[in-house]
Image (spheres, grey):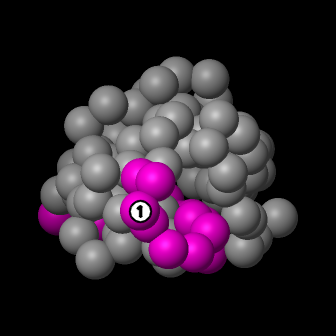
């Protein structure tokens, strides 16, 4: 599935597996961080990338050097199969190159 090229208005769905029940794990060992990381090439500062996890839109995004980080809660992530939808809602007309999603990961850091 990856890398995946995005054109304006197009949605790409990427499956992602999680081998742990994060709701149960959080009750035993609190997380210091749980996040979705998306690494892209050619994503301009004025581009708008809509991201959803299992059909739920994710809003609060941190962007830095082509890496988008979205904080998650344990109840948003399923044990087993998950899917991330990526839609390039707006692409800057002056941007060069195609927006390419290279890496998509869920990071879990325990306290």
Looking at the image, residue 72 sits to the left or right of residue 15; the answer is: left
Per the image, label 1 sits on a secondary structure element best described as loop
Q: Residue furthest right?
A: 1
Other residues around mark 1 within 10 Å, as few (<14) / some (14–19) / many (≥20): few
Q: Which residue is mark 1?
A: 94
Quarter holding the N terminus?
A: bottom right
**Is residue 47 a member of the stretch shown in magenta?**
no
Q: Residue at x 47, y 25 (%)?
A: 57
Looking at the image, residue 109 sits to the left or right of residue 78; the answer is: left
Does the image show residue 62?
yes
**Image coordinates for residue 52, horizontal then vertical, percent:** 54, 33
For the record, the magenta segment spans: 92-111
**Image coordinates for residue 4, horizontal then vertical, percent:** 73, 65
Q: Residue at x 57, y 75 (%)?
A: 97
Q: Quadrant of residue 54?
A: top right
Q: Eyeballing the image, is 56 above or below 45?
A: above
Q: Residue furthest top?
A: 56
**Image coordinates for residue 69, horizontal then vertical, percent:** 32, 57
């Amino acid at each position: 599935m990856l890398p995946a090229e995005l054109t304006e208005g197009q949605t790409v769905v990427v499956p992602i597996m999680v081998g742990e029940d994060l709701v149960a794990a959080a009750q035993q060992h609190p997380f210091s961080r749980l996040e979705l990381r998306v690494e892209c090439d050619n994503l301009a500062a004025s581009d708008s990338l809509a991201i959803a996890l299992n059909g739920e839109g994710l809003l609060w995004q941190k962007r830095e050097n082509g890496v988008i980080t979205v904080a998650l809660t344990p109840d948003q992530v399923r044990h087993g199969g998950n899917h991330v939808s990526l839609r390039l809602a707006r692409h800057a007309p002056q941007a060069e190159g195609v927006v390419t999603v290279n890496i998509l990961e869920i990071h879990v850091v325990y306290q």
